[in-house]
């Protein structure tokens, strides 16, 4: 499978930022049965991972509010017109302490580019560039700002 070939390359690329909450994400539970196209992540193919603290994620829309320390990760890849495949950004949501950022539901969004460079972090580097994450996820406020993959791609 294409994804399996890219997984190790992506992990190495993203690991350039070893301080990130997403370090080691590939060892977390992958809730996607197969990569699926995410319209809200640049029409890239993505997988949904969550750390052990976020285990309630397995209940999808019935997950409730995830506890502080929960991290949800989406790795990504793009398929070009010529059938070439490239690793895309790693998208992270980390649940922070209550009151950290009420506008984001206390989620910190981070995007790590293919080469390991951090594009942005909520309340940190290029925070303005991450506002689009908050603006999109606020629509899912009733689900703790979480979107879930379509039913046919759930494990």
Image (tube, rainbow, N blue to C red):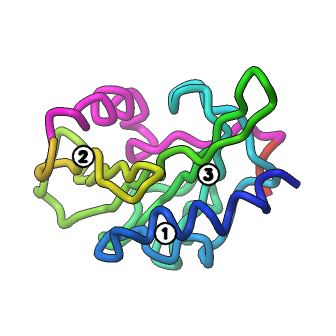
Residue in view at x 30 percent, y 28 percent: 132
**Residue drawn at point x = 70 percent, y = 57 percent:** 6
- Which residue carries the number 1 mark? 54
Q: In front: 133, or 23? A: 23
Which comes before the other along the chain, label 3 or label 2? 3
Q: Residues within 10 Å of mark 2 (few under 14, many from 20)?
A: some
Please identify, in this view, whether the residue under mark 3 or under mark 2 is nearer the observer. Answer: 2
Q: Residues within 10 Å of mark 1 (few under 14, many from 20)?
A: many
Give the secondary structure at mark 1: helix
Please name the residue that numbered disc 3 is placed on.
60
In the picture provided, is 22 more to the left or to the right than 106? right
Residue 129 located within the stretch drawn in magenta: yes
Q: What secondary structure predominates along the stretch shown in magenta?
A: helix
Residue 141 position within the rendered picture, expressed as x and y whole percent measured from the top left: 36, 36
Residue positioned 29% across, 75% down in the render: 19
Q: Which of the two discs, 1 and 2, sits closer to the camera?
A: 2
Q: Nearer the viewer, residue 104 or 62?
A: 104
Residue 120's label in the rendered image is 2
Quarter that holds the N terminus: bottom right
Residue 13 location in percent, x, y? 49, 63
Q: Is residue 111 left or right of residue 27?
A: left
Q: Position of residue 69 (x, y in %)?
A: 33, 73
Number of numbered discs visible in the structure rendering? 3
Task: Please provide the residue range marked out in magenta.
Answer: 127-152
Compute the Cα span from label 3 to label 1.
11 Å
């Amino acid at each position: 499978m294409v994804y399996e070939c890219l997984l190790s390359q992506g992990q190495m690329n993203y690991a350039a930022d070893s301080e990130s909450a997403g370090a080691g994400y590939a060892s977390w539970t992958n809730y996607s049965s197969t990569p699926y196209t995410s319209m809200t992540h640049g029409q890239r193919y993505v997988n949904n991972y969550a750390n052990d603290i976020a285990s309630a994620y397995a209940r999808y829309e019935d997950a409730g509010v995830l506890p502080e320390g929960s991290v949800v990760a989406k790795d990504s890849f793009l398929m070009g017109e010529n059938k070439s495949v490239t690793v895309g950004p790693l998208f992270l949501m980390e649940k922070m302490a209550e009151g950290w950022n009420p506008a984001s539901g206390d989620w910190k969004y981070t995007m790590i580019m293919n080469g390991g460079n951090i594009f942005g972090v909520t309340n940190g580097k290029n925070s303005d560039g991450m506002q689009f994450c908050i603006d999109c996820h606020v629509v899912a406020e009733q689900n703790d700002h979480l979107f879930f993959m379509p039913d046919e791609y759930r494990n």
